[in-house]
Amino acid sequence: MTAELIDGKGIAKQIQRELTEEVAHLRETHGIEPGLATVLVGDNPASKTYVRMKQRRCEEVGIHSVGYTLPADATQAEVEALVSQLNADPTINGILVQLPLPGQLDEEAVLNAISLEKDVDGFHPLNIGRLAMKGREPLFTPCTPTGIIELIDRTGVQIEGQEAVILGRSNIVGLPVSMMLLKRNATITICHSRTRELAEITRRADILIAAVGRAEMVKGDWIKPGSLVIDVGINRVEDDTRKRGYRLVGDVDFAEAVEVAAHITPVPGGVGPMTIAMLLKNTVTGAKHAAGLL
Ligand code: GUN
């Protein structure tokens, strides 16, 4: 069996096209221009790249984006003062504080300071709390998990009643995607660094989500034949045949997995592009909320 590829890059582009139309419509008929503020603290190269990509995509769809950069030694008070200023700014509908923050900062307090209505990352404790609870709905859900659910839905594979195994329990991906799958009535198992007999658990998965950051850890014989595999990992492995000296691989051994699964996301071009598409979508939703259109 050769799995069908889930084209995250193409789907993200399609979503961006739809958002471009929607933003133009909002401007023409309601005079609304959605706005996103990005906050980068320090000069982590990966974070800088991600923030730049987020800003560029905003411009492409017509969302106005404003970037703030604070020095690596910024104080808690400085970061929170910037967040307060953005909370009060009516031209801003979404506030994105790029994570991770430098060690001296209290991440929870910073995320808590973001106005619930502008929490387009979905990391505010109240939004996460609502996500974790039955019968409650968050205003926003985190971008990578939301993108994963969108990719699963577009394969036509139903989530309800399926065994979903999630490798990784990070606040950004593993934990929230587990909560979202649970809300959709999957039976979830969350695995982490202390889990024993990993492969035995993953082999039960109708839906397997790998988000641990370990290059090609999930082998073909860890995968249930005919299952759906979502690979969130983006890992650099040395490769002298490439000009830049490395290539990107996921947490799943793609060459093996593609022979076993029915659907699989590639790396790159799978989950990655969906994260930004969902951020843009959340920002447009924030603008519609602020204008009383939702
Ligand atoms: N760092 C890695 N992923 C994310 C994300 O989705 N949002 C933010 N704010 N920081 C991140």
Image (spheres, rainbow, N blue to C red):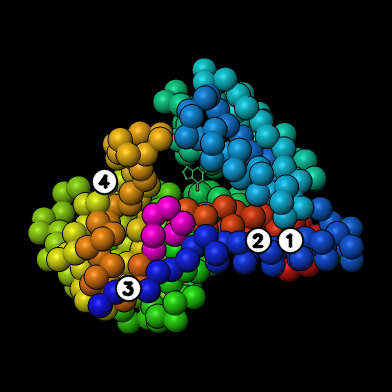
Q: Position of residue 259 (x, y in %)?
A: 24, 70
Residue at 83%, 66% (x, y): give it: 25
Q: Which residue is mark 1?
A: 20
Residue type for callout 3: Ala
Residue at 58%, 39% (x, y): give it: 51
Q: Position of residue 8 (x, y in %)?
A: 49, 63
Region rendered in magenta = 265-270
Residue type for callout 2: Gln
Between disc 3 and disc 4, whose residue precedes? 3
Residue 210, placed above or below residue 106: below
Between disc 4 and disc 1, whose residue precedes? 1
Can residue 269 be seen here? The reply is yes
Distance in Å between CA atoms under marks 1 and 2: 6 Å
Q: Which residue is mark 2?
A: 16
Find residue 40 and report its image quarter. top right
Distance in Å between CA atoms under marks 4 and 1: 36 Å
Q: Which residue is mark 3?
A: 3
Distance in Å between CA atoms under marks 3 and 4: 22 Å
Distance in Å between CA atoms under marks 2 and 3: 26 Å
124 and 195: which is toward the camera:
195
Can residue 167 be seen here? The reply is no
- Location of the C terminus by quadrant is bottom right
Between disc 2 and disc 4, whose residue precedes? 2
Residue type for callout 4: Arg
Residue at 80%, 45% (x, y): give it: 91
Contact, mark 1 vs mark 2 (Cβ under 8 Å)? yes
Query: Where residue 214 is drawn, which disc sits there?
Result: 4
Q: Position of residue 175 (x, y in %)?
A: 36, 55
